[in-house]
Amino acid sequence: MNPLAAEYPAWAAYASLTTNLPPPVIRDPAQPLVSIVVPSLNQGRYIGATLSSILAQTYPNLEVWVIDGGSSDETHDVLRAFAGDERVQVVVGKDAGQADAINRGWARARGAVLAWLNSDDTYLPGAIATQVAALQAHPSAVAVYADAVYTNEQGRPLRAIAARPYHPLALLRLLIPMQPTVFARRVAVGLAGPLDLRWRYALDTAYWVRLAQFGPFHPTSAIVATYRLHAASKTVAQFAGFYREWLRIAEEGFAAMPELRPARRAVLADIYAAMANLEARNGSLRAALRYAAYALTLAGWRPRLAKTPLVLLDRLLGSDLAERAGSWWGRRSGR
């Protein structure tokens, strides 16, 4: 089994990392090897649960690459507890951010199936077996994705997020697969090349758009992962960075897939509507109205704008109308 970067020219920049690797653990030759990368930086309070959720899986063939960018918290003490498991390899050293860390792990991957799991998220029991079976059942798919559960900082479930039906335009509209549920074929990742280091906030969105140029994604009807929301997570704390990247990724997606370009104005309007909802949730009424106006100017009324007044009501009343409506719509459109 060759490391990915030693096999695919698109990964040549990472080929120097592929020498003297320990052999992967193969317990059932009839099943493919799965390679999972855990990018890590100062998530010591969560990474133990992340790795435990991976290693508790019953799937037989597994290699785990923890790529730590030089954590200064308790991460390394936690990682020492996993040193005896031959499936886990830890690489410590400075990197160029999350995308580079994932690339450094995938470059070393020998698996036919690849995934990454952030160091504050977890897999639910049976996740890997479920997603490998889905790839085997849908040979035309370059990747599979599934339902997930948002949890709070303590890991308590908040709400389920349904996997929406797949279409390339859905990716551009930010109806993206929940990142911890995605498992991709080695060949697709090999051809698509490394994650782009330009993206800090929406690197998963950008990569799914690139993978989509090689084939479709397929949704699985199962809840397979948790996605932790906490004050330090980029999803919670850094909206403005996402906004800039979403718009750039959409424009680049239309350039790469010109057949989708007739939908450009509607897609950009949907992105602005999503931005309006986030600003409403954050209590920034002026920004929410500004982004809603951009959406209306681009493409008229968008269904996503119906959520904006609900978000404002939730903030005023302490209710969760917007989340209930979103969950209902996700279930309705996803099944």
Image: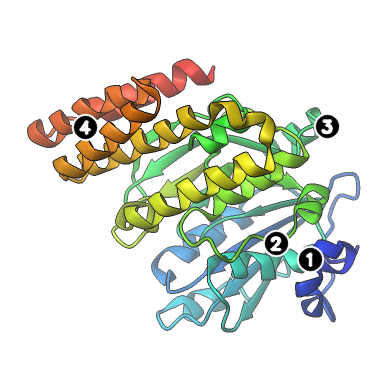
What is the C-alpha distance between the residues marked 2 and 4?
37 Å
Secondary structure of the residue carrying tag 3 is loop
Kind of residue sitting beneath label 4:
Val
Pointer 3 with pointer 2, Cβ within 8 A: no
Given residues 314 and 305, the one toward you in this image is: 305
Pointer 1 with pointer 2, Cβ within 8 A: yes
Q: Nearer the viewer, mark 3 or mark 4?
A: 4
Given residues 98 and 270, the one toward you in this image is: 270
Kind of residue sitting beneath label 2:
Pro
Residue 40 can be seen in this image: yes
- What residue is shown with label 3? 139
- Mark 3 or mark 1, earlier in chain: 1
Q: Position of residue 280 (x, y in %)?
A: 21, 39
Pointer 1 with pointer 4, Cβ within 8 A: no
Kind of residue sitting beneath label 1:
Trp
- What residue is shown with label 2? 194
What is the C-alpha distance between the residues marked 1 and 2?
6 Å
Secondary structure of the residue carrying tag 4 is helix
124 relative position to 318: left or right: right
Pointer 3 with pointer 1, Cβ within 8 A: no
Q: Position of residue 91 (x, y in %)?
A: 64, 78
Compared with 68, 302 (above or below) is: above
Given residues 128 and 269, the one toward you in this image is: 269
Q: Which mark is residue 11?
A: 1
Q: Quadrant of the C terminus?
A: top right
Q: Mark 1, residues whose alpha carbon is within 10 Å: few (<14), some, or many (≥20)? A: many
Kind of residue sitting beneath label 3:
Pro
What is the C-alpha distance between the residues marked 3 and 2?
23 Å
- Figure label count: 4
- Mark 3 or mark 4, earlier in chain: 3
